[in-house]
Image (spheres, rainbow, N blue to C red):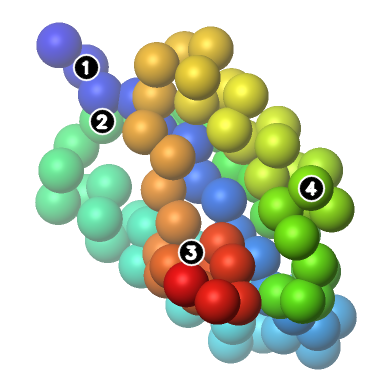
Amino acid sequence: MKKFFVEYRRVSRESQGEGHGMDAQRDAITTYLTNVGGELIGSFQEIESGKLTSRDRPELHKAIALAKKRKATLLIAKLDRLARNA
């Protein structure tokens, strides 16, 4: 049975958006997918402060909705990308 994955990446500042932060998360997720196989069916990213609650992250909600709809696994490179207080 084929595994499906949805990735969610977040950085806090615009300067991290096209730099090391977002790239490092993409690399970690790509390495994981290479090791476990499966298919990436969606990719979502945001530039939002970690101070905001998950209610304030529309891309996170889209990623979760797609993962639920397709019975996929939501991939987040690091837990601190999901919430400031992990």
Q: Earlier in the sequence, mark 1 or mark 2?
A: 1
Q: Secondary structure at mark 2?
A: loop
What percent of the width, then of the height, locates residue 67? 50, 26
Which residue is disc 2 drawn over? 38
**Foreground: disc 4 or disc 3:** 4
Which residue is disc 3 drawn over? 26
Residue 55, numbered label? 4
**Foreground: disc 4 or disc 1:** 4
Residue 83 in view in this figure:
yes
Which quarter of the figure is the N terminus placed in?
A: top left
- Tell whether label 1 touches label 4 (CB within 8 Å): no
What percent of the width, then of the height, locates residue 31? 27, 61
Q: Secondary structure at mark 1?
A: loop
The residues bearing labels 4 and 3 have C-alpha atoms spaced at a distance of 23 Å
- Tell whether label 2 touches label 1 (CB within 8 Å): yes
Q: Earlier in the sequence, mark 3 or mark 2?
A: 3
Which residue is disc 1 drawn over? 2
**Foreground: disc 2 or disc 4:** 4
User: Mark 3 is on which residue type?
Assistant: Arg
Q: Secondary structure at mark 3?
A: helix
Residue 8 vs 12, above or below: the answer is above
Residue 13 vs 27, above or below: the answer is below
The residues bearing labels 1 and 2 have C-alpha atoms spaced at a distance of 6 Å
What percent of the width, then of the height, locates residue 39? 35, 29
For image coordinates 60% across by 77% down, the residue present is: 84
Q: Secondary structure at mark 4?
A: helix
The residues bearing labels 3 and 2 have C-alpha atoms spaced at a distance of 16 Å
